[in-house]
Image: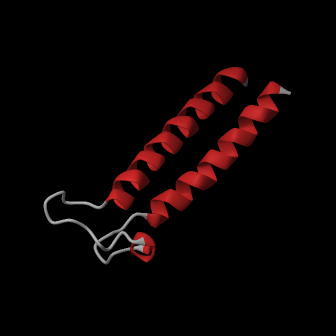
Amino acid sequence: MLTDAIVTINVISSLGLILLVLLHSGKGGGLSSLFGGGVSSIASGSSVVEKNLDRMTIICLALFAFTTIIVGLRWT
């Protein structure tokens, strides 16, 4: 039962990670420019939207890595 919950969290975090990576702006602006990421301050170098997107991506990546390790340890 606990393994099923961890696998479910792992799948949700992996899908979230895919979505968040696709939202990042590349060389051409990306999908994040649709949500206000194109308007950035010259002094800061990146907008608040990009910084928050980076933070959410790192949190989702940490959750994905943690659940992947836990599932690997439980199934061996």
Q: Residue furthest left?
A: 43
Q: Position of residue 30 (x, y in %)?
A: 39, 73
Q: Residue 9 sits in which quadrant?
A: top right
Report the front residue among 53 and 14. Answer: 53
Q: What residue is shown at x 48% (from left), y 65% (from top)? A: 22
Q: Position of residue 51 (x, y in %)?
A: 34, 53
Q: What residue is shown at x 34% (from left), y 57% (from top)? A: 48
Report the front residue among 45 and 59. Answer: 45
Q: Position of residue 32 (x, y in %)?
A: 42, 69
Image position of 6 (left or right of 26)? right
Relative to 23, say whether 7 is above or below. Answer: above
Q: How is the image coloured?
A: secondary structure
Q: What residue is shown at x 59% (from left), y 53% (from top)? A: 16
Could you tell me if residue 63 is visible in this image? Answer: yes
Image position of 74 (left or right of 4)? left
Q: Residue furthest right?
A: 1
Relative to 24, say whether 59 is above or below. Answer: above
Image quarter where the N terminus lies is: top right
Q: Position of residue 76 (x, y in %)?
A: 70, 21
Q: Residue 38 sits in which quadrant?
A: bottom left
Relative to 29, say whether 75 is above or below. Answer: above
Could you tell me if residue 76 is visible in this image? Answer: no
The number of numbered discs placed on residues in the rendered structure image is 0
Image position of 36 (left or right of 13)? left
Q: What residue is shown at x 33% (from left), y 75% (from top)? A: 29
